[in-house]
Image (cartoon, rainbow, N blue to C red):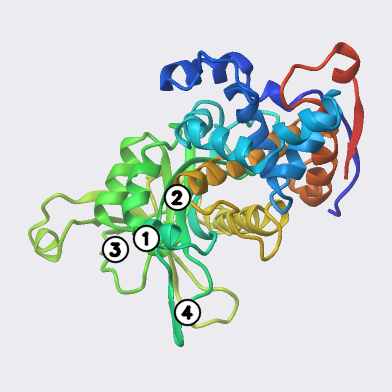
Amino acid sequence: MGERPVGVSIGALSKFFPQQEIEGILRASGREGKRRRKLPALDLMYYLIALGLHASEGCRSVLRRILVRRGSREGEDLDRLCSDSAISQGRTRLSWQPLQALYEAVVRPIAIPSTMGAWYRRWRLVSLDGSTLDVADTKQNERAFGRPGSGRGKSGFPQLRFLTLLENGTHVLFGAELGSYRTSEAKLAKKVVARLPADALCLADRYFFSYPLWQAALMSGAALLWRMRSDLVLPKLKRLSDGSYLTKIYPSARARARDIGGIPARLITYRLGKGREEYRLLCSIMDPRKAPALQLVDLYRKRWTIETVLAELKTRLRGPRVVLRSRVPNLTRQDFWALLLAHFGVRALMHEAALEEKIEAGDLSFTHAVRTIARYLPLYVSFFPSPQEEALQVTLA
């Protein structure tokens, strides 16, 4: 289905980032502030989310746009509020922890039973994957995050690494964990899989599998469907009615030889067309009647949704060839969490639009939605909208 325009009531993005929630986070972190400042901490939180939507625009330009739309005076007061020093001091005081706390508090799976493309039978479809983001090329960022090598020496920019879960039906990225480029995906994944919803069916690529990670993911209560590497030994213990096999995974070859610590699972093997490569999926749903093998093979293709969503985060929201703007690690981390919050705001609004039109979220244009929301966001950054503003109609196409 092609992308289509959908009329929605945009209201305020603040409904996804409640003021009361933010004020509680600021109090708990000791950043609420007792002095009346030019840029209060609450305004800074909303402003930083706005920066996530205007990632390719300068900090001063974004703040000026917001303040002008709010009716602030032109001239000296506006220049002082939008000065580099005022913005830098405010962001430094706030740091990154309140942004991460807000992300952890509000960004979660939002699909409801009527959300199209979000479910397989009783399970919520969730994918696991990770990526990297370029950060500003400074010595401080390089020390904190590291830099990938290249055949000719160092690469262009330092990079941070992150791992995340995706709710397939809404394209919401939740449960994310941030690390340096040097941080292994396995280390990040151990924290991320603990955040799997109990009603999830988690899809993951072959490079994530390990006995400890599978075991940790099962502890969440979620069902798992992960591709397996070809070099892993998986005994075919019994053929089932749908052509899949009962198998067990073990912590080591020695444990397998002695049948110690084995975790039961289902093994699904298949080839694509006339191809010679055998693909293998490991599934924790043991009863083939609840999840037949052919359906699971078809379902696994939805794992690629997370690749698409990570691309929209990196190139459509942030902008192609745009690096995270801050030159010091604490503010770079702040940029990262603000970017994910902005992405959630866009996707939450698009989910509402998709529900209204009874279509999948993937049928809406993310790029156009970002442009539309960015255009109207300054109206809502630091206060709740009036009833007239709540009724404002825009088109997400």
Q: Which mark is residue 329?
A: 2
Q: Nearer the viewer, mark 4 or mark 2?
A: 2
> Helix or strand or loop: what does disc 3 sit on?
loop
Q: Which mark is residue 277?
A: 4
Point out the tag, 1 or 2, that comes first from the N-terminus: 1
Q: Amino acid at mark 3?
A: Lys
Q: Residue 52's spot in the image, x, y percent?
A: 66, 43
Q: Is 102 in front, or is 65?
A: 65
Point out the tag, 4 or 2, that comes first from the N-terminus: 4
Left/right placement of residue 94 relative to residue 309 reads: left
Q: Which mark is residue 143?
A: 1
Taking the spot 70% from the left edge, 51% from the top edge, the residue there is 317
> Helix or strand or loop: what does disc 1 sit on?
helix
Q: With respect to residue 186, does 357 lie above or below?
A: above
Distance, label 4 to label 2, CA atoms, is 44 Å
Q: Amino acid at mark 4?
A: Glu
Point out the tag, 1 or 3, that comes first from the N-terminus: 1
Q: Quadrant of residue 223?
A: top left
> Helix or strand or loop: what does disc 4 sit on?
loop
Residue lying farthest to the front in this orientation:
76
Left/right placement of residue 34 relative to residue 168 reads: left
Left/right placement of residue 298 relative to residue 177 reads: right
Q: Label 4 neighbourhood size at 10 Å, few (<14), some (14-19), many (20+)?
A: few
Left/right placement of residue 127 relative to residue 14 reads: left
Point out the tag, 1 or 4, that comes first from the N-terminus: 1
Q: Amino acid at mark 2?
A: Pro
Q: Label 1 neighbourhood size at 10 Å, few (<14), some (14-19), many (20+)?
A: few
Q: Nearer the viewer, mark 1 or mark 4?
A: 1
Q: Label 3 neighbourhood size at 10 Å, few (<14), some (14-19), many (20+)?
A: some
